[in-house]
Image: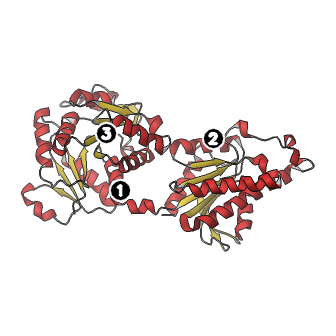
Amino acid sequence: MLKTVIIADDLTGANDTGAILAQDGFHVGTVIKRDRMEDFSSFNTLCVSTDSRAMSAEDAYEAVRSAAALFPHHPDMLWSKRIDSTLRGNVGAEIDAILDHLGEDYHAIVVASFPGSGRSCVGDILLVHGVPLQLTEVSRDPITPITTSRVTSIVRQQTRHEVGYIGLEVVAGPSLGLLEELHEVLKKHRVVVIDAATPHDIRAIAACCAASGEKIVAIDPGSFTAALADYTFNRAKYETEQSILCVVGSATELTQKQIAYLRAKDDPFVVKAEVARFFEPKTRAEEINRLVEAITSAQDRQILAIVTTESAADLLNFDDIPATAGMSRRECATTITAALAEASERILELSGERIGGLYASGGDVSIAICERLGISGFDVKMEVIPLAIYSRLAGGTRPQMPVVTKGGLVGKEDTLFQCVDYLKEKIK
C-alpha cells in the first residue's frame, strides 16, 4: 500500500528526499513517466517532480495540484511537499496547492532546516553553514533571488493562509511543551513554520506531529519528511524502544553544565536525589523509594536520570547535616553512592528488559552499582570520548548490558549528551 507521497519542485530534490526514506527501509520510487503509474504498484513511497521552481506562481500551483491528483488519497497517507533548501521557487503557492487538494482539515508544517546540508533555522532565520540566507549567493539567483533570511516572511509573501511560528526554545524544551504549543498554534494557522538546528530537533518535531493526531503535510527539504515517515509508519520500533538509566553521582560544576545541556538538547526524565536524606535510616529508605517510584513510573521516556546536583545551590556541606557527625568525607561519599546503587538495582529489577543501557558518572558510583548488581567486570569496547568508556557488563544480573562510565571532571558541556546518544545506537 502507498504510504508516502513526495511532490518536489525538481527531480534532484525528489530523488534526494526519496533516498533518505529508502535508508529507513521504505521502498521508494521516483515517477518520471506519469502514464506508467502501474509500474510502481509495489512501492510504498513515491516521489514526483513538478519542475516548477522557475514557473510563475500560478503555473506552479497548477503543477502541484496536477501531480497530487496522480495518487490515491486515503487518510493514513503522509504527504510531503519537498521545497528547495534555500527556499527558492514558489514555496507559498505550492503549499496552497497541496492544502487545497487535500482539504480543509490538513495543515502545513514548514521545517526549512536540513542539518546534513548545513541548513539550520534559528529565530526564524535560515542559516546556510552559519550564514544568513540573504547573504549567500542565492540572493543573486537570476530567476528566484532571495531578499530576506526570515522563513515566515518568505512563506507569508507567497501563501494566502495565515502563517504561525514556533521557535527553537520550544523545540529544544520538553516534548510535552512542544506538543501543547503545536496544538495551540494550529488552532489559528493553517501553515506553521518551526525552527530546528539539529537532527534531534527535527526528530522532536516529527515525534510531536506524529503524536498530535492532526493531519499534517510536511513542507521541507527532506529531513523532516523522513523523520515524520519513520515515526508514523515505523512506530512499533519506538514503542518498544528500550530506555537508558543515567546515574550521575558527581557534583562538579562541569557535571551540572552537562546535565543542563542534556535537558536542552533531549527530553530526559530527571529526578534529583535529596542527598541529605540518605544519612538517616528512615529517610534513606523513603528517599530511595521515591527515586525508584519516580523513575519506574516514567514509562514513556527513553532517558531516565538520577542526579545529585543540578546547580551550585544543591551542593551540600556535610557539616550542616547532623547525621554525618563523626563521619569522614569518604564515609559520607560512600553512603551516597551506596544509596544510588541500591536505587539503581531496584529500578533495573522492576523495569525488566525495558532498560537496555546504563550510564554512570563518577568512578565511585560505577563501582557501587557493579557491586550491587554482582558484576564481575567490564567487557571494554572503546572510548566514546577520551576517558568516557563504552563497555558491556560481564557477569552479574545484567550480563552484556551496554554501559558508559565517565569521571565527574571528564569531557565538555556536551559530553553527557554525546554518551547518551551513543548508547541509544547501541541498544537499538
- Few, some or many C-alpha atoms within 10 Å of disc 1 (few <14, some 14-19, many ≥20)? many
User: Residue 323's x, y, as percent?
Assistant: 87, 48
Q: Which residue corresponds to mark 1? A: 230
Judged from the image, the secondary structure of the residue bearing numbered disc 3 is: strand
Q: Quadrant of residue 102?
A: top left
| Numbered tag placed on residue 110 in the rendering | 3
| Numbered tag placed on residue 257 in the rendering | 2
- Few, some or many C-alpha atoms within 10 Å of disc 2 (few <14, some 14-19, many ≥20)? some
Residue kind at label 3, given as amino acid type: Val
State if disc 3 and disc 1 touch (CB < 8 Å). Answer: no
Can residue 105 be seen in this snapshot? yes
Q: In front here: 4 or 288?
A: 288
User: Residue 415's x, y, as percent?
Assistant: 59, 48
Q: In front here: 239 or 223?
A: 239
Question: Which residue appears farthest toward the left when viewing the image?
Answer: 35
Question: Which residue appears farthest toward the bottom when viewing the image?
Answer: 395
Judged from the image, the secondary structure of the residue bearing numbered disc 1 is: helix
- Identify which residue is drawn at 19% across, 30% down: 142
Q: Quadrant of the N terminus?
A: bottom left
